[in-house]
Amino acid sequence: MADKVVNIVCMKWGTLYGSEYVNRLYGMVKRQLKRPFKFYCITDNAEGIREEVLLRDLPEFTPPPSARGPWRKLLMFQRELFDIEGKTMFLDLDVVIVGPLDRFFDFSDKFAVRHEFDKRKEKDSFGNTSMYVFEAGSCPEIFEDYLKNPLEIHKKYYTAEQEYVTRTLFAAGKLDFLPNDWVISFKEHCLPALPKRWWQVPTLPPGASVLSFHGRPLPEDAIQGEWPLDGKPFWKAFYKFTKPCLWLSDYWRE
């Protein structure tokens, strides 16, 4: 039996990420996913996005001013996710695909996500939503309950949308955790500890498929050996440092 078509979805709004992030994400997925797929981008600006990407307009949804983190990602949990049906993988724009993706679609029929990268939470119910796999439309309560009382949810889950999503689904028995070595963090798993990062190049652990760049540096920064401080005190450059990571260019490309 031929593999069913699966979906890859990313979201782009604002100006932090340009169209090149979508285009490179598509290229990385195409190289690492053997089964047929449709690639969607939900966006407020489609300019420059390659023609293979299926574009969907970002719906009107403005989280309250008290919101911390990318709460617009809750749009993925609409009861009807545009015309998207079936097994769906969500990917943040700043991830780098470094290994095979097919195994994620075979792992579980539940919402599948990695534990938060903080090692203190690896036995907790808190997951990292830089990537996850689920059945489109299968968790509408996440979005609908949020709309009923967003301020209370922000107060309870102040760390960002991923805590609300993963703790809620875990409590409902709808979540399975992926193996931690499938999805890794550049800062937590590739970057040498201090002071070695001043002379050693970051390395990629074996067995990984998705490399997450949460916050700074972004992939383009790491390749150049840059770590923007974004207004933080200059002395933080002592530990916010990486050697140029040229091997990332082998993966982060169209």
Image (spheres, rainbow, N blue to C red):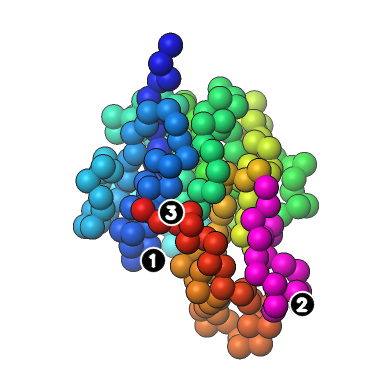
Residue at (46%, 45%) from the top-left corner?
91
> With respect to residue 24, does 8 lie above or below?
above
Q: In the image, which residues are magenta?
A: 188-206
The residue where tag 2 is placed is 195
Instruction: Say which of marks 1 and 2 sits in front.
Output: 2
Mark 3 is surrounded, within 10 Å at the Cα level, by few (under 14), some (14 to 19) or many (20 or more) other residues, namely many
Residue at (60%, 27%) from the top-left corner?
107
**Amino acid at circle 1:** Leu
**Amino acid at circle 3:** Leu
Residue nearest the viewer, comparing 85 with 213: 213
SS at circle 2: loop
Residue 16 is tagged as 1
Q: Earlier in the sequence, mark 1 or mark 2?
A: 1
Q: Is residue 24 visible?
A: yes
**Amino acid at circle 2:** Pro
Q: Earlier in the sequence, mark 1 or mark 3?
A: 1
